[in-house]
Image: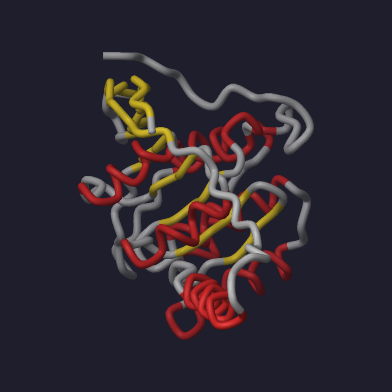
Amino acid sequence: MTLNSMKLEVEERQEGGDEMCRSIEVVSSTFAAKHCDFDFASPPSAAKDDAEGDCHAEDSFIPPLNFAMVDNGIFRSGFPDFANFSFLQTLGLRSIVYLCPEPYPEANMEFLKSNGIKLFQFGIEGYKEPFVNIPDNMIHEALKVVLDVRNHPVLIHCKRGKHRTGCLVGCLRKFQSWCLTSVFDEYQRFAAAKARVSDQRFMELFDVSSLKHLHHCNSPIRGGNEQAY
């Protein structure tokens, strides 16, 4: 195991704010990939124990709440916790798009550092109807990050993976020229009984014309402005 210096960049988007990005110098551990080879010299009982151990290891790969694949290299979910870290490692993530204003938990930050994952945070408040104010500019900036293939594989998440994540994915679908019926159907599958008319109205009115010059999953796209502290 070797210690390497790496830079963890935390992108922040605050409505009306000047801060766009901060970079944190961290020290992370780089682990060699583990290769499991069958030991033909082991007695049958030992081999059986190893097999049972592998089964228990597979059981530990627990996806976060509402986890799903959105597109090649793009995933969505609710807030991941310690129990989900092993599963997230299998995705080989480069980036996480976090849509809540609260600071990222220390345990999650350590996970990002140790796996070389970049965090892009867009602090969208979790408003409830009828007092809903989804910041259009933050959704635009978040989409730029998601559409930049240099950030893939990327995980999009908020708290439950329903409303804020659903709105961002819905706007991505509009960019992909999905019809509104399909956009709403996907949103409702995750939001279920918690579906909000205001969210669907936002997706319906969201203007993707300013993003049309971007080429999803075809060429590298720079997502947002970067400023290092």
Q: Nearer the viewer, residue 155 or 88?
A: 88
Residue under the point 66% across and 74% down: 185
Q: Position of residue 128 (x, y in %)?
A: 31, 68
Would residue 41 be found to the left or right of residue 110 on screen?
A: right
Q: Position of residue 99 (x, y in %)?
A: 38, 49
Q: Nearer the viewer, residue 53 or 228?
A: 53
Residue under the point 38% across and 61% down: 80
Residue under the point 30% across and 50% down: 108
Res 10 quadrant in image: top left
Q: Position of residue 149 (x, y in %)?
A: 66, 33
Would residue 211 be found to the left or right of residue 83 on screen?
A: right
Viewport quadrant of the C terminus:
top left
Would residue 75 be found to the left or right of residue 2 on screen?
A: right
Q: Residue furthest bottom?
A: 193
Residue under the point 70% across and 53% down: 71
Residue 137 position (above or below residue 205): above
